[in-house]
């Protein structure tokens, strides 16, 4: 069996592990939000159906691409990316639901989910900054911008 080559990218193993742990939480939050948004896309009803159906589709498609970028960054740091519902359930801060909310409640829950992803991304910055890990910082900044904008757009539908 061939031994893996050591990773020498200018970030210590300790720092890479801390960053990968934070990114794993971001991955879990992002995947959970993806699933919730996709569910709402399928099940939304009411007078705002078309608007919400299309908005939710745009958001879950963007999240589907994002989870791949986050997982690939974890792998580039030399750590396995979590990839099961069980792992995501243990890592995420976004609650799982088993009810059928109305459209307004869907929007409220998605705002909360978008903001949770922002907070999770922000929480990884200290480890990233300590390691001078600019690629991870760039990824986190992009994720925060997207989720802050999504939260604002969703919130605007509630008139606030």
Image (cartoon, helix red, strand yellow):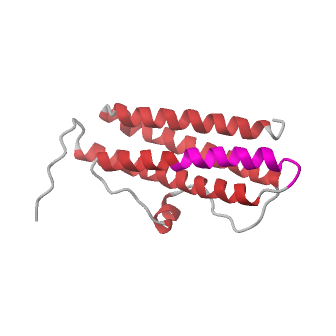
| Image quarter hosting the C terminus | top right
Q: Compared to 87, does 5 lie above or below? A: above
Who's the residue at 72% across and 46% down the image?
54
Q: Secondary structure of the magenta portion, mostly?
A: helix
Q: How many badges with numbers are in the image?
A: 0
Who's the residue at 23% across and 41% down the image?
12
Residue 20 point in image, percent of width and height: 36, 49
Q: Compared to 102, does 146 lie above or below? A: above
Residue 57 point in image, percent of width and height: 66, 48
Q: Is residue 135 left or right of residue 65?
A: left
Residue 103 point in image, percent of width and height: 81, 53
Q: Is residue 59 magenta?
A: yes
149 and 133: which is toward the camera: 149
Q: Compared to 99, does 48 lie above or below? A: above
Q: Is residue 72 magenta?
A: no
Who's the residue at 61% across and 49% down the image?
60
Q: Compared to 148, does 72 lie above or below? A: below
The segment highlighted magenta reads 46-64
Residue 84 point in image, percent of width and height: 46, 65
Who's the residue at 36% across and 34% down the image?
135
Q: Is residue 31 left or right of residue 155?
A: left
| Image quarter hosting the N terminus | bottom left
14 and 71: which is toward the camera: 71
């Amino acid at each position: 069996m061939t031994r893996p080559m050591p990773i020498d990218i200018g970030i210590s193993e300790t720092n890479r592990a801390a960053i990968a742990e934070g990114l794993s939480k971001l991955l879990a939050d992002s995947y959970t939000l993806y699933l919730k948004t996709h569910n709402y896309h399928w099940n939304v009803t009411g007078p705002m159906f078309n608007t919400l159906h299309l908005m939710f589709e745009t958001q879950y498609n963007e999240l589907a691409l994002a989870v791949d970028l986050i997982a690939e960054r974890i792998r580039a740091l030399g750590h396995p990316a979590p990839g099961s519902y069980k792992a995501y359930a243990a890592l995420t801060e976004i609650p799982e639901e088993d009810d059928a909310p109305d459209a307004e409640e869907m929007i409220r829950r998605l705002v909360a989910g978008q903001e949770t992803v922002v907070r999770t991304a922000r929480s990884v910055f200290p480890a990233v900054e300590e390691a001078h890990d600019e690629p991870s910082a760039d990824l986190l900044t992009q994720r925060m911008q997207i989720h802050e904008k999504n939260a604002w757009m969703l919130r605007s539908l509630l008139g606030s």
